[in-house]
Amino acid sequence: MGNIVLLDDLTINKIAAGEVIERPLNVVKEVVENSIDAGATKITIEIKRGGKQLIKVVDNGKGIQKDDMDIALERHATSKLRKIEDLENIYTMGFRGEALASISAVSKLTMISRTNKDDFGNKIIAEAGDIIQREETGSPIGTTIIVENLFFNVPVRYKFLKQDATEFKYIKDWVQKAVFSNPSISFKLINEDKVVFQSNGNGKIEDIIYSIYGKELKENIVKVDFEEEGIKVTGVIGNTRIARDSRKDQIIFLNKRNIRNQILTNSADQAFKGSIGIGKYGFFILNLEMPANFYDINVHPTKMEVRFVDDDKIYKIFYHAIKNAMLTKEFLGNTQVEKNEEYVANEFEFLTNHFTKETNTNNYFSRLTVNANKSINILEEKDDLIYRQNKRDVQYKYIGIIFRTFIIVEIEDQLYLIDQHAAHERLLYEQIKENYKNNMSSNSQMMLVPEIYNLTHKEFEFVTQNIEMFKIYGFDIELFGSNSVKINGIPDIEYRSKSKNIFLEVLDEMITNERVSLKDVEERFIATVACKAAVKANMDLNQHEVDYLIQNLLKLKNPYTCPHGRPTTIKFSKDELFKNI
């Protein structure tokens, strides 16, 4: 008695609409996923003419029994389901029982398979869905699927296929994703008789990243290993030096199945915010492991889309996984790891909730005053969430400042450049945000002569919509007729640049990079105030100010970049320097 059965009508009707083989990629995906489900540790994929002429997948899985060979090509025939309740406990890549039937209907399909209980393999050949040949044959344990002349009987679908190179690129991209989710499986991809990609199956995702993305990216990844409430997130993210112009390197797996999900994408965006450049996207390859009853994969035949039972929980856990990993990197040579759960939870609360509590009358900006002589001494010794429990232990030798911008320090055999503006901006940003989260009121420095600004309609509309935010941060501002505002006071911060320009500088930055989300507006506003308040390049700092800046950076939980994503430090090894001498 074989393992494959035809599903009953009730289960068939509950399964999403039938699989459509649109291009060679669909064939490769379905057949390789069957190989993975069969427990294969080696999978070879051979392609000719972009898959139009030939797709051959050879695996060393458990094989298919002789009694199951014919029925495997029937629609809704599967070994992975028996009844409707099984849909709530599916962990295999496939389960619909449609793929081989759909493929054989539009091609010539050859299936050769042997189990460890058989002395010989069995082969069947089907064309346009009809079995035309059955025979015993010599075969190693496992299964070989050969698909030839795809869409030979569906010319309408064939003519919409792209050039061979493009179709192969789709296949290659998918195979590489499959390798990331199954690092313990050895994959080999052959195109036109040439090996294009091969993994060793040693389980190390770093080796796969090296072979696909290169050495530089491998050296700038951070491992993720986070678990909460029965959900585990593992994989890698790029550190703050790695950012992308698109989302193509944001890869998500759910129980090793590649998926797309806007909730997870949004969560990742929030986690990377403030650590990578504006308009950039973080790099990550992450797998979520969770019980099958936490989600529904039976949304679309491609199984790329998924619905979660509790969206908020998944959003929060994914955010925490990424953010925690980002805070475990070395800084100025120090690799001490500290628990950051409370800080990350506080950041998450800030990003996902709008603080509307009444502000008190504490002197908000008095703690942030920057005078001309002591531009760095702005942070008090206090037990805040933004600080580590124990300051990082770093012994450095101060060398000097180059270009009136970069502080040079020597630590063991490493040379570090500290960007004075980015570093000070991060300090201010963290403190301003912490005070903002505590709903502390600002005070203003009154101007000798109030300034009246005539604004564009867009600028005036932005100020009108966000006037309370301006006031919270110390702008004594009032609407003054049509498209005009009157500025009586500015935040109580001393600037070496002309302080009266601060309002226009902040407004211009906010308008230029306007966001739809309220929290994005608030976040950007805080970052902009910090940027305009921080010491700039070409401003001279003495050694006392440099030491104070570095010591405060060592206290921060997140000292790695300015809020706009610019690194606070750059490292050069002794060997790197001597290479150029």
Image (cartoon, helix red, strand yellow):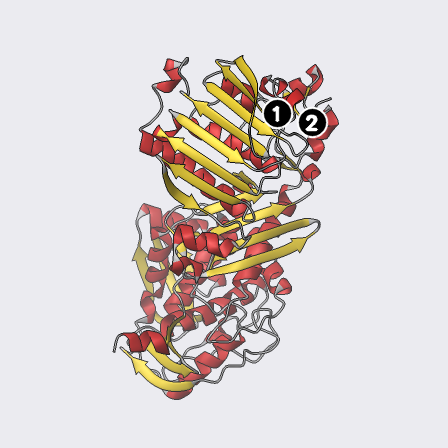
Q: Real-space Cα distance between discs 2 and 1?
A: 8 Å
Measured as percent of width and height from the top left, residue 378 is found at 47, 78
Q: Is residue 169 left or right of residue 436?
A: left
Q: Is residue 158 left or right of residue 309?
A: left
Q: Is residue 10 visible?
A: yes
Residue type, mark 2 in image: Leu
How crowded pointer 2 is (Cα within 10 Å; few <14, some 14-19, many 20+) is rated as many
Q: Quadrant of the C terminus?
A: bottom left
Residue to which mark 1 is pinned: 96
Residue to which mark 2 is pinned: 81
Q: How many marks?
A: 2
Q: Is residue 3 left or right of residue 527?
A: right
The residue closer to the viewer here, 273 or 176, is 176
Q: Are marks 2 and 1 in contact (CB under 8 Å)?
A: no
> Which secondary structure, mark 2?
loop
> Which secondary structure, mark 1?
loop
Q: Residue at x 66, y 29 (%)?
A: 118
Q: Quadrant of the N terminus?
A: top right
Q: Is residue 206 above or below residue 308?
A: below
Measured as percent of width and height from the top left, residue 81 is found at 69, 27
